Amino acid sequence: MKEQKKQPELRFKGFTDDWEERKLGDLANIVRGASPRPIQDPKWFDKDSDIGWLRISDVTEQEGRIRHLDQRISKLGQEKTRVLIEPHLLLSIAATVGKPLVNYVKTGVHDGFLIFLNPLFEREFMFQWLDMFRPNWKKYGQPGSQVNLNSELVRSQEIPIPILEEQEKIGSFFKQIDDTIALHQRKLDLLKEQKKGYLQKMFPKNGAKVPELRFAGFADDWEERKLGDVAPLRGGFAFKSSEFRNTGVPIVRISNILSSGEVGGAFAYYDEQDKDDKYILPDKSAVLAMSGATTGKVSILSQTSHDKVYQNQRVGYFQSVDCIDYDFISTIVRSELFMMQLESVLVSGAQPNVSSKEIDSFDFMIPKLVQEQQKIGSFFKQLDNTIALHQSKVGKLKVLKQAYLQKLFP
């Protein structure tokens, strides 16, 4: 059979040769890891060992680049597995099937991985190609079942591949993008941890009337208030789904309150109504999913391209009350304090749900002075904006990387 030759849409300067189709098994000695059995036996592990133990759970936690391992394998366990001393490329064939990873530490390798030994390719190039190719492994699974990859299937998989020098250019380019994504992700994770810490210190703990950390100039005790007294939850309206349109006024439905804390996704639209004040959600309003998979999730509405937005049924809106700062309210309804009370009233089952009456009954400590509320609200709003900025950078970099993957690989 004649070899297929391909070229990508975009190339680095100086490279013009066709790429050639090669089987992965011809480019490396692909072997499976090994696990001591029974795996629960403590004799296989030793916290003082300098050899780690690579598990499936480590892959997703470290985004495919293994730089530290919590579990360590004993000398006895090392005799029952494959131990890697140098960095290697691996491929997960269990749980997170088809996920490639680069291991940078000394480790024993679980039998849920394949190891690429003695490679004839540039490691970073192959890591990126395997990551891009990952959805294609689904063809080896039965509908509705988990994909079952084995070493022979992987060995027989063909890949278009250029000369080594071009592989190095491509691998280095994507490694720089990954490093930049990881940098912003670390900043994002740190900011989220900082916010969590500030929330714990800037709100009174159980039984306390003042927080541990306060802005200068404030000394009064806080007071306990019902959420319904300071930000009553207004329910939405049952717009007829049969009258949804592709244009008009967007409607915030439950599906638009995302787990990321944003209001987004695909909107339904409705014809603009006369005297529609009661339907409209104010810009920057805090909205709550009152049923469905994201029940209890609170997101902040940002009207960036619409004059007005309507509120659908089972979407709650925390209304503004005089003498209460709304940024402060937006902070407490997205805090662990809110989630703890939510868990006590959440009706679980096939369709989790909460009522506005239950939400309004939640108790919170509130500063008496609106000026202190404003200080706290403004502080967390700025922190949220910084978190959103880094989240946006991570998202844009990932989109950019996908675009380059499509152009730099055939």
Image (cartoon, rainbow, N blue to C red):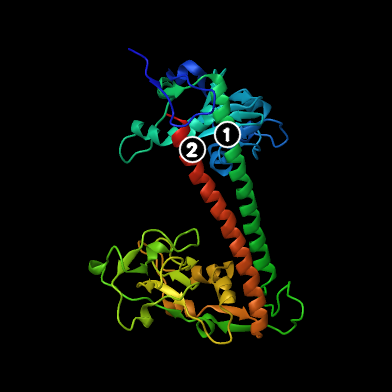
Question: Viewed as shown, does residue 197 lie left or right of 287?
Answer: right
Q: Which residue is mark 2?
A: 404
Question: Viewed as shown, does residue 264 lie left or right of 203?
Answer: left
> Residue farthest to the top?
1
Give percent across and percent down for residue 296: 46, 67
Quadrant of the image occupied by residue 217: bottom right
> Residue farthest to the front?
13
- Mark number, residue 403: none
Quadrant of the image occupied by residue 326: bottom right
Quadrant of the image occupied by residue 332: bottom right
Query: The residue tagged with tag 1: helix, strand or loop?
Result: helix
Check whether the beta carbons of the residues at disc 1 and disc 2 lie within 8 A of each other. yes
> Residue farthest to the bottom?
322
Whether residue 241 is visible, yes or no, is yes
**Amino acid tagged 1:** Phe
Of the pair 190 and 304, the residue shown nearer to us: 304
Of the pair 176 and 199, the residue shown nearer to us: 176
Give percent across and percent down for residue 294: 43, 62
Q: Quick check: 290 above or below 145?
A: below
Give percent across and percent down for residue 55: 56, 36
Of the pair 334 and 361, the residue shown nearer to us: 334
Give percent across and percent down for residue 227: 53, 80
Whether residue 92 is visible, yes or no, is no
Residue at 40% x, 20% y: name it.
Answer: 156
Query: The residue tagged with tag 2: helix, strand or loop?
Result: helix
Mark 1 Cα-neighbour bin, 10 Å: few <14, some 14–19, many ≥20 = some
C-alpha span from label 1 to label 2: 10 Å
Q: Which residue is mark 1?
A: 173
Q: Quick check: 321 above or below 145?
A: below
Q: Earlier in the sequence, mark 1 or mark 2?
A: 1
Q: Quick check: 352 above or below 51?
A: below
**Amino acid tagged 2:** Tyr
